Image: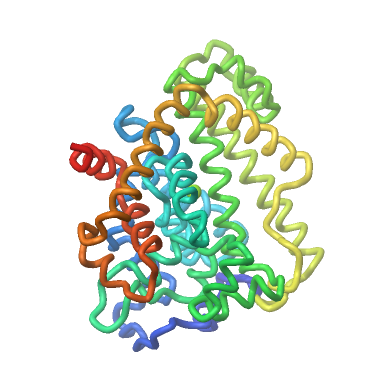
Amino acid sequence: MNRELAAYSVHPESSLGRVYPEPQEPSQSGRNPFQRDRDRILHCAAFRRLEYKTQVFLNHEGDDFRTRLTHSLEVAQIGRAIARRLQLNEDLVEAIALAHDLGHTPFGHAGQDALNDCMKDFDGFEHNLQSLWVVDELEERYPTFNGLNLSFETREGILKHISRKNIRIHQDWLGLLAQRFENQLQPSLEAQLANIADEVAYSNHDIDDGLRSGLLEMDALNASELWSSRRQFVLQMYPNLEGRRLRHEVIRHMIHLLVDDLVNHSKQLILEYEPQSIIDVRNSPLLIAFSEPIREQVLELKSFLFNNLYRHQRVLKETQEAAAQIEFLFGYFLKRPHEIPAHFRQQDSQNLHRRIAHYIAGMTDRFARSEFIRLQN
Ligand code: MG
């Protein structure tokens, strides 16, 4: 057993393994299964495409805004920092964080909603399931199998949620992953952590990007307790601080507060439930969690961002135009399936709608836009 890891963490030697058995890593290179998973994710094409996919602000709006790629890197950074403090498996958290958004469509949430709409009579479009599809099927990098053949624990972290209907439909594919949901077991603490690190990352960087864009204003943000308390705290130390230095300092303190609270409260929960192994973790309630007062502040901040940023007229206008482009592309390929790239045409096991969804979900913003322009004329 690795002495640095707590008993309740995921230990590489007890991994439930890969779908296609592979030889152990030669000992001289010394990578454990989750380090190998991380490296496979980092080298795959879907990961590189995250650079040109919208987080909130469309890619062409400015070079300083987050993209899905930089978002994923921030999730990995925050997740790893917390994992170290809780003696969880940092490599596994990193692998999950880097892969968690691989299934996102172009154009952010509007793109996803549009694709879900196109698929409504064909089992819908779920981005978590799509991320799993990418790593299990769509990447073509190995001679004898599809996908990246990642470890069970990494795949479990990627498939955060799934609808009951899709569990039933994909029972054979999901195997053990489906059983977790059916038996209402919790995922590993590493998966729970990657999920919350996602929330910490986007809540904070969306404030940063929102302020940078001018769509949010610092004074309006005082409606959020989390923001206003940290702003006051910073201004006590630096009364004359303003502009971007103030913004960054307040956000830094918000992240510190959230991370400290998460670590302390999770430690308490772990003490209370005393998980001695991953099996105990699966049978406990969620153990990686904010304290109640901070959880409420996070919810308040998220609803502020929802109403004032994600639903801001300018964001909506941009993304709705983009969503219309996705609907156009979907309709176009439905009529002309022979124009889908061969790689997607050949997946005989899937219906045409699903194959088109796979193709469009993999597109970057700029590729979807240029295809829209090219095919419209
Ligand atoms: Mg995310």
Which residue sits furthest top?
A: 240
| Front residue of this view, candidates 158 and 371 | 371
Q: Position of residue 66 (x, y in %)?
A: 39, 37
To which quarter of the image does residue 146 belong?
A: bottom left
Quadrant for the C terminus, please: top left
Count the marks: how many?
Answer: 0
Q: Is residue 172 left or right of residue 372?
A: right
Q: Position of residue 117 (x, y in %)?
A: 49, 48
* Residue located 42% across and 43% down the image: 111
One can see residue 80 in this view: no
Q: Position of residue 148 (x, y in %)?
A: 35, 72
Residue 220 against residue 264 in the figure, above or below:
above
Residue 301 against residue 151 in the figure, above or below:
above
Q: Is residue 123 left or right of residue 301?
A: left
Residue 354 against residue 51 in the figure, above or below:
below
Which residue sits furthest front?
A: 335
One can see residue 141 in this view: yes
Q: Is residue 281 left or right of residue 133?
A: right
To which quarter of the image does residue 317 belong?
A: top left
Q: Position of residue 285 (x, y in %)?
A: 76, 64
* Residue located 50% across and 78% down the image: 12
* Residue located 26% across and 77% down the image: 142
